[in-house]
């Protein structure tokens, strides 16, 4: 049985999370989880000439760290599944050029991390690859100037806005644990493919609201497909709904008779402290990627939580579609992570 | 055995191609294969207000046609794997919104069609989905204004340039043939993941040259991984190298002791006739997608060719990376299609 319901994949061999790594920026260091990241960027460009080149270097650092942490050369990664927020996902593609390993480019906006893990787990669980390196990243300075305004304008953000996280997260999956190193208790047991949901939100500063319906839809289907209840999960973690989107998710969930209250966490709400003044929190592919890599996975590895439903959430619009009056479609892919002895 | 060599996946259950459909533009209709496409767009906007909305409608038409052709409702598609050339792949994502089926967004530039088929075949072969709908599209008018110049400028193209194909191709894969309809002789037996290759080409009008090294690399590895020879394939078809890139591929192949001469075909060189004056031919995700859907697959189905190695080829740069002086990385993913009684 490798399918359940309409959209859930069951991983019979439960691929292992072997390693994970994160690199984050200064603003993320100042947040409540600043101490968990593996590396903090002293400089937003990492010594490169442009922010875009700095973002690429940040992703490469996370990818290389995930491999060296467990003593594996990059050739042993099996393949890279990655994406980012820049047009034509140039961060991921140019990073892949440096690594010379098989590469699959993904675009799921901020849902990319779980899209990569879902597909990577399929390749490993099915026996098509022994390992798969999954990654996503975003960068405040590159995203801001591509999606919104030149940084030099110093535009102020409205109250529903979220700040794009500067960060890269990488997770190495494998068919079997490594002999003397790496994680050995975190396994992927199932995943649910997201559907595009759109309730008609047109405010590009309120992406949390645009993504909440997709998150609710995927959580509900995951539970239904597997015949499970909310309480079967210690945590249900969403990617970057932020404060406003999280409230909306809880309301939508309540309408659907799901009780998320005490087990829902949102990476977007977690990553900054209110004192930092970033309104509704963090967003961007990097937001869920760095907290997954450096907080959620280690918590499962040490047995502090036993089963986590993790959903990165994406808003699939573009600046052009927004100009053409389109509303913002959302999507969320879910993976179920479990602690095993 | 589901792996061979460093980058090849073997599909033990050999997923079936159940259906395929294409929609193309007027310029493509005037080319030598104009008669094979399922539908020709009378108008580049398909009656919509913008080219982008027209492109989306074109993709939706191809997706729906692939399903209705075999009498299946869209819910039976299993999942959609798709991508296009627009920023944030808005064509695929907004099309997915209309369909409300599980969706995985991909970005492989013009390599997207084989990336989608490779991943779709993995999901079906591994038993995770009964079917998968794979698609890619591009549109001259949307690509031109995003990647190059406003159409109103009437810019002339240099001799190495290729024209972005207006077209959408969709292919439905399945674990078993349908009882009374659809293709039943075309199966996917293997696929090779591409690596990013970059020989330093910086001319964004010469993408064929940027992609040829990746195509050569993937062809060589597919043959090596499977212990096969060029002559084991009736055709080796590349996506959109165009005339110049195809010559370069044959030279690179000759250096690598591969004899492609009489079995290599390139969709970019095939899709227009020289009289149309489009220089080196066609490009864009839609180029290989429409010729695969409406020419290559039907030729295999009727047994005219027995085994085809099909590689969509992508140039992974962005206008921004080009402005920042970066060279153009290329990638090619290969699928091996075989006729079976």
Image: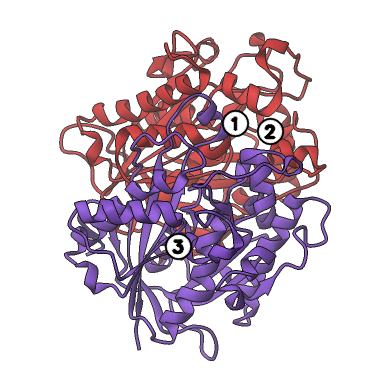
Chain colours: A red, B purple
User: Numbered disc 2: what chain?
Assistant: A
Q: CA distance from mark 1 to mark 2?
A: 7 Å
A307 sits to left or right of A314: left
- A226 w.r.t. A50: above or below: below
Regarding residue A199, the answer to whether it shows in the image is: yes
Q: CA distance from mark 3 to mark 2?
A: 36 Å
Q: Nearer the viewer, residue B167 or A289?
A: B167
Contact? badges 1 and 2 (CB < 8 Å): yes
Callout 2: SS: helix
Helix or strand or loop: what does disc 1 sit on? strand
Using a 10 Å C-alpha cutoff, classify the residue at mark 1 as few (fewer than 14 neighbours), some (14 to 19) or many (20 or more): many
Residue at point 64%, 22% (across, down): A144
> What residue did someone put label 2 on?
A246
SS at mark 3 in the image: helix
| Residue B19 picture location, percent across and down | 53, 77
Pointer 1 residue:
A266
Q: Is residue B22 left or right of residue A126?
A: right
Residue wearing tag 3? B117
Give the vertical position of A231 relative to A136 (above or below).
below
């Amino acid at each position: 049985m490798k399918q359940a319901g309409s959209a859930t994949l069951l991983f019979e061999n439960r691929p292992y999370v072997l390693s994970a790594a994160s690199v984050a920026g200064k603003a993320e260091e100042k947040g409540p989880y600043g101490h968990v990241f593996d590396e903090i960027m002293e400089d937003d460009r990492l010594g490169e000439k442009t922010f875009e080149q700095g973002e690429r270097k940040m992703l490469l650092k996370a990818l290389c760290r995930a491999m060296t942490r467990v003593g594996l050369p990059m050739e042993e990664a099996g393949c890279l599944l990655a994406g980012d927020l820049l047009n034509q996902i140039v961060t991921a593609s140019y990073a892949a050029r440096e690594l010379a390993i098989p590469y699959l480019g993904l675009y799921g906006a901020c849902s990319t991390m779980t899209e990569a893990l879902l597909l990577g787990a399929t390749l490993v669980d099915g026996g098509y690859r022994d390992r798969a390196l999954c990654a996503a990243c975003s960068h405040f300075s590159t995203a801001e100037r591509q999606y919104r305004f030149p940084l030099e304008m110093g535009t102020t953000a409205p109250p529903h806005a979220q700040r794009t996280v500067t960060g890269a997260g990488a997770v190495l999956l494998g068919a079997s644990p490594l002999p003397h190193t790496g994680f050995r208790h975190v396994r992927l047991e199932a995943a649910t493919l997201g559907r595009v949901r759109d309730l008609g939100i047109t405010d590009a500063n309120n992406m949390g609201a645009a993504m909440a319906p997709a998150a609710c839809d995927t959580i509900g289907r995951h539970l239904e497909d597997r015949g499970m209840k909310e309480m079967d999960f210690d945590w249900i973690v969403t990617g970057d709904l932020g404060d406003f989107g999280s409230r909306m998710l809880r309301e939508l969930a309540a309408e659907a008779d799901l009780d998320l209250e005490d087990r829902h966490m949102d990476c977007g709400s977690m990553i900054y402290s209110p004192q930092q003044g970033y309104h509704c929190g963090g967003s961007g592919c990097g937001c869920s990627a760095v907290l997954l890599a450096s907080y959620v996975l280690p918590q499962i590895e040490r047995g502090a939580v036993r089963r986590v439903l993790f959903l990165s959430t994406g808003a699939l619009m573009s600046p052009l579609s927004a100009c053409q009056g389109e509303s913002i479609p959302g999507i969320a892919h879910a993976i179920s992570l479990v602690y095993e002895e």
